Amino acid sequence: MVMKHSISRRTFLKSSLLTTAGFWLGTSSGLARKVSANAKLNVGVVGTINRAGANLNAVRGENIVALCDIDDRLLAAARARFPKARLYTDFRRMLDQRDIDAVVVSTPDHTHAAATMAALKSNRHVYCEKPLAHDLFEVRAVTRAAAKHRLATQMGTQIHATGNYRRVVELIESGAIGLVSEVHVWCERVWEGGGRPVEMPPVPQGLHWDLWLGPAPARPYHPTYHPKGWRRWWDFGGGTLGDMGCHYIDLPFWALKLRAPTSIEAEGPPVQSETTPGWLIVRYQFAARGALPPVRLTWYNGGKLPELVAAGGGVPNWSSGVLFIGAKGMLLADYGRRRLLPEKDYEGFEPPAPSIPDSVGHHEEWIAACKGGAPALCDFSYGGPLTEAVLLGNVAYRSGRKLEWDAAACKVTNTREADSLVRHPYRRGWKL
């Protein structure tokens, strides 16, 4: 059964991560409070607008006891909805509030790990937006911390909870298109950078700019970074791949039981030291998994497309999609659609009976896990390796080399030029 396999995959990842040396995790301050299924969690929320606002809204049925944002005006607006919540501008101070059971982290990528690790070390359950962290060292450390402390976690890949993704996984696992050795993933979204601003406008009143920067290198405030443009800057985000890779690569990761890639190479426009590219193609190689063959997965964004799509090779030109190529046919999918190809070969095809139970909801999975239920399907034992694979695409692009990846050691083995991209230095006063 599919669900049994998912549990064994999670167990394998947790055990392998726990035996990987080289990360100091600190000590815990005590066990997380046990909350019954019928009681409400006391939740602290880091971030209040945009994606953070959606996450806050999704957990509003629990007790929102703390709100954190680096903008006083945004905090005031959030408090109007949750008048009993205590307010903070620094998540480190928020975690001193002893009645918090669980934390939702929805900051920009560069502070995901710092906030998440602090919450885990204080024995709070954590929901963290995707990608799980900003660099590979952070991802591995956070993943191991969650496993060590046995806390309920979930990464914000909300599409994983939809029925369409489940039906695609069932089709692949049923052998509808045969064994799959090639996948193409493309996304229309573009996060393209530019030069660093030269003007230095004043920091808006009530905005705590130093806290927004967190562990990233210091730089003057500019509205191009906050509140929305930060994904275009390497110091804060990962461009289109960092933004959307965890959503679209999630589907082949789940359906094909992928783990760590063995090699990664990328092409794109000339590398800019500050900002992310307008287009990118990344080629990942994954090893065989038991009876499943090796897989070559290629990512495209910024208008680049697989040849089968661009050349009109019988594959619909969807704006974004995942194309599985199997020994007997192809399967094209996106968030809400799926299509077996060539369509004439699948006339009258009867799909397998649903075998993966419907999700109670992406956030609801995590809430239930916090209260002693089954682990959420995108907990960090799954979301961590998925994020690592995504981030490796950017490392390959920025290093300009085909990378050989040793997942057990969390290290590129064929060049030291990638070391600074695997682990970024933290600004003084910040730690993981």
Image: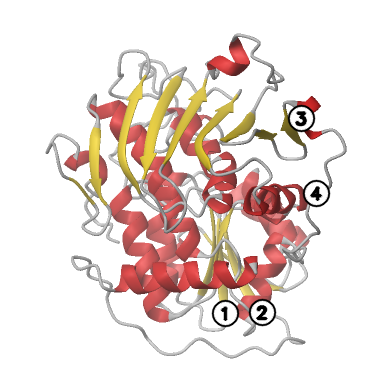
Residue 160, placed above or below residue 34: above
Q: Counting other residues with Cα less than 10 Å from the Cα at mark 1, is it few (<14), some (14-19), or many (20 or more)?
A: many
Mark 2 lies on a secondary structure that is loop
The amino acid marked with disc number 1 is: Asp
From the image, tell me which residue sits under label 2: 41
Name the residue at the right extreme.
348
The amino acid marked with disc number 3 is: Asp
Question: Which label lies toward us, 2 or 3?
Answer: 3
From the image, tell me which residue sits under label 1: 101
Residue 377 drawn at (x, y percent): 60, 64
Disc 4/disc 3 C-alpha distance (Å):
14 Å
**Between disc 4 and disc 1, whose residue precedes?**
1
**Between disc 2 and disc 4, whose residue precedes?**
2
Is label 4 in contact with label 3 (beta carbons under 8 Å)? no
Quarter of the picture holding the C terminus: bottom left
**Between disc 4 and disc 3, whose residue precedes?**
3
Q: Which mark is residue 351?
A: 4
Is label 1 in contact with label 2 (beta carbons under 8 Å)? yes
Query: Would residue 394 be seen by someone viewing this image from the given angle?
Result: yes
The amino acid marked with disc number 4 is: Pro
**Between disc 1 and disc 2, whose residue precedes?**
2
Mark 4 lies on a secondary structure that is loop
Residue 288 drawn at (x, y percent): 39, 50
Disc 1/disc 2 C-alpha distance (Å):
6 Å
**Between disc 1 and disc 3, whose residue precedes?**
1
Q: How many marks?
A: 4
Q: Residue at x 84, y 47 (%)?
A: 350
Looking at the image, residue 40 sits to the left or right of residue 424; the answer is right
The amino acid marked with disc number 2 is: Leu
